[in-house]
Image: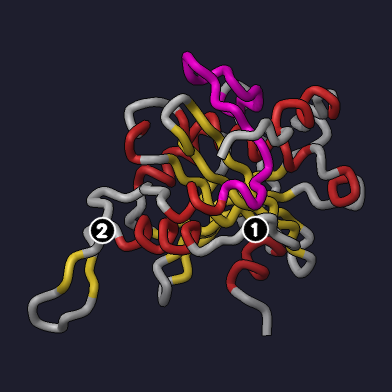
């Protein structure tokens, strides 16, 4: 049985084949913050930093006095933080991107090619709470999209859709992806997850020089 995501991406009645506003879809890393982060693919040396990564406010869940179950005002943030802390890079099937500044790990992004949908799925885009006033999330999402355009094996085979799933109450993430040119294409009512997608047509893909991008994410010994 097809998943709601598969059906949404396959339907041409939904806005899956999107042409993004070129002014809102900026794919140049380093253009949105005054001090660009140092990006690289996650390695074994990042495990300790991931285990301490805080992207939620408050940083910990409290205990419900009645049910004694953990609770958080933004449970979607807590789920992402818990998931990222449990990762043990390097990963086999997922692409895990980390960004560092002078204060340490500032941003984490994760995506994967999904064969069922013939699309790329952005599983996580998270920035540390200590940099919440900067445009780090925009910087991270732009970098992830740039990396996806360099997945030559998949892009040349027709993988041109990028999608993610965002909780319907997560207004900050919805605004983030909307700024990057994504559009909401459906809501799974049972889970409360909205599917957001963008189509990278030939006129929208900026295939920057691979040597330049690879140099930007080479493990430089941090962590």
- At label 1, counting other C-alpha atoms closer than 10 Å, the crowd grade (few under 14, some 14-19, many 20 or more) is few
What residue does disc 1 label?
A: 13
Q: Quadrant of the C terminus?
A: top right
Q: Quadrant of the N terminus?
A: bottom right
Q: Residue at x 40, y 63 (%)?
A: 79
- At label 2, counting other C-alpha atoms closer than 10 Å, the crowd grade (few under 14, some 14-19, many 20 or more) is few
Query: Residues in magenta?
Result: 24-46
* Closer to us: 152 or 116: 152
What residue does disc 2 label?
A: 60
98 to 164, vertically: above or below: above
Q: Is residue 13 visible?
A: yes
Q: Residue at x 22, y 68 (%)?
A: 71
Query: Would residue 140 be found to the left or right of residue 120 on screen?
Result: left
Q: Position of residue 52 (x, y in %)?
A: 41, 51
What colour scheme governs how the chains and residues are painted in the rendered image of this protein? Answer: secondary structure
Query: Would residue 78 be found to the left or right of residue 164 on screen?
Result: left
Magenta highlight on residue 31 = yes
Q: Residue at x 65, y 58 (%)?
A: 13
200 to 78, vertically: above or below: above
Q: Position of residue 64 (x, y in %)?
A: 14, 74
Q: Position of residue 77 (x, y in %)?
A: 36, 55
Dot in front, 1 or 2: 2
Magenta highlight on residue 103 = no
* Closer to us: 115 or 16: 115
């Amino acid at each position: 049985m097809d998943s709601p995501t598969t059906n949404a991406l396959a339907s041409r009645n939904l806005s899956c084949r999107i042409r993004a506003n070129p002014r809102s879809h900026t794919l140049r890393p380093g253009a949105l913050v005054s001090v660009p982060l140092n990006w690289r693919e996650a390695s074994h040396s990042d495990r300790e930093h991931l285990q301490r990564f805080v992207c939620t406010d408050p940083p910990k869940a409290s205990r419900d006095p009645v049910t004694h179950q953990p609770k958080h005002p933004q449970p979607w943030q807590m789920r992402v933080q818990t998931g990222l802390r449990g990762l043990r890079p390097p990963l086999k099937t997922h692409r895990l991107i980390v960004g560092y500044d002078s204060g340490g790990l500032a941003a984490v992004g994760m995506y994967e090619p999904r064969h069922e949908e013939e699309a790329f799925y952005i599983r996580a885009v998270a920035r540390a709470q200590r940099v919440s006033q900067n445009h780090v999330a925009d910087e991270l999402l732009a970098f992830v999209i740039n990396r996806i355009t360099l997945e030559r094996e998949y892009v040349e085979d027709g993988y041109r859709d990028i999608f993610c799933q965002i909780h319907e109450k997560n207004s900050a993430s919805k605004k983030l992806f909307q700024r990057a040119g994504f559009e909401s294409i459906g809501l799974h009512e049972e889970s409360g997850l909205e599917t957001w997608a963008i189509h990278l047509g030939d006129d929208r893909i900026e295939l920057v020089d691979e040597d330049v991008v690879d140099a930007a994410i080479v493990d430089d010994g941090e962590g």
